Amino acid sequence: MRVYIIEDESLIRELVYTYVSSLPGVEIVGQADDGAIAMQEIEQTHPDLVLTDIRLPEFNGMEVLFLLKRRHPEMKVIVFTGSVTADKVRLAYEGGADGFIEKGAGLEDFEEAITSVRAGHRFFGGHTRQMLVQMLGPEVLKRL
């Protein structure tokens, strides 16, 4: 699986890069600290999966999600953030995000999310899954 990472904090980007690139069958094809630059590079590299932080300069992660899902509906997008709100979770879900990761949950969630997305499922872990159930009802679990 070809992966592109978008994260504006260099330490977190390097941690995600190191961890995700160590997963079997994963190749990192690019990384950026800015949504606008990332969009240009994604158009050239055509990754299978984009991991994007929500808070970014230029285009934020939600804008990246919406643009990618419109231009490349087959491309998988997992968003992550350190500040989870019900609005962000709902917007990501309704925008077609294939996954949502809370930064505080740990790097293992990246592996679980990637594994889930590879298997054709959506990954909303722990707290975000509970938020979706509260907002949209238990039937939402059938769509994850």
Image (cartoon, grey):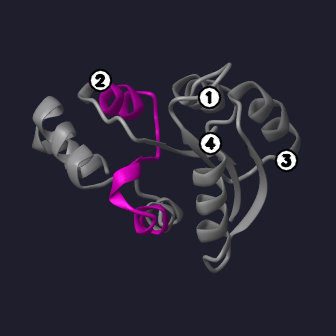
Secondary structure type for disc 1: helix
Circles 1, 3 touching at the beta carbon (< 8 Å): no
Indicate whether 95 appears above or below 46.
Answer: above
Q: Position of residue 89 (x, y in %)?
A: 32, 33
**Residue at 75% over, 35% down:** 38
Report the residue marked by disc 4. 7
Residue 60 placement, left or right of 82: right
Secondary structure type for disc 2: helix
> How many labels were placed on the picture?
4
Give the mark, 1 or 3, whose residue is nearer the N terminus: 3
In front: label 4 or label 1: 4
Report the residue marked by disc 3. 45
Residue 131 placement, left or right of 111: left
Give the mark, 4 or 1, whose residue is nearer the N terminus: 4
Marks 4 and 1 sit apart, C-alpha to C-alpha, by 12 Å
Q: Is residue 111 magenta?
A: yes
Quadrant containing the N terminus is bottom right
Report the residue marked by disc 2. 87
Residue type at mark 4: give it. Glu
Marks 3 and 4 sit apart, C-alpha to C-alpha, by 17 Å
Circles 2, 4 touching at the beta carbon (< 8 Å): no
Mark 1 packing: few (<14 Cα in 10 Å), some, or many (20+)? many
Residue 139's image quarter? Answer: top left
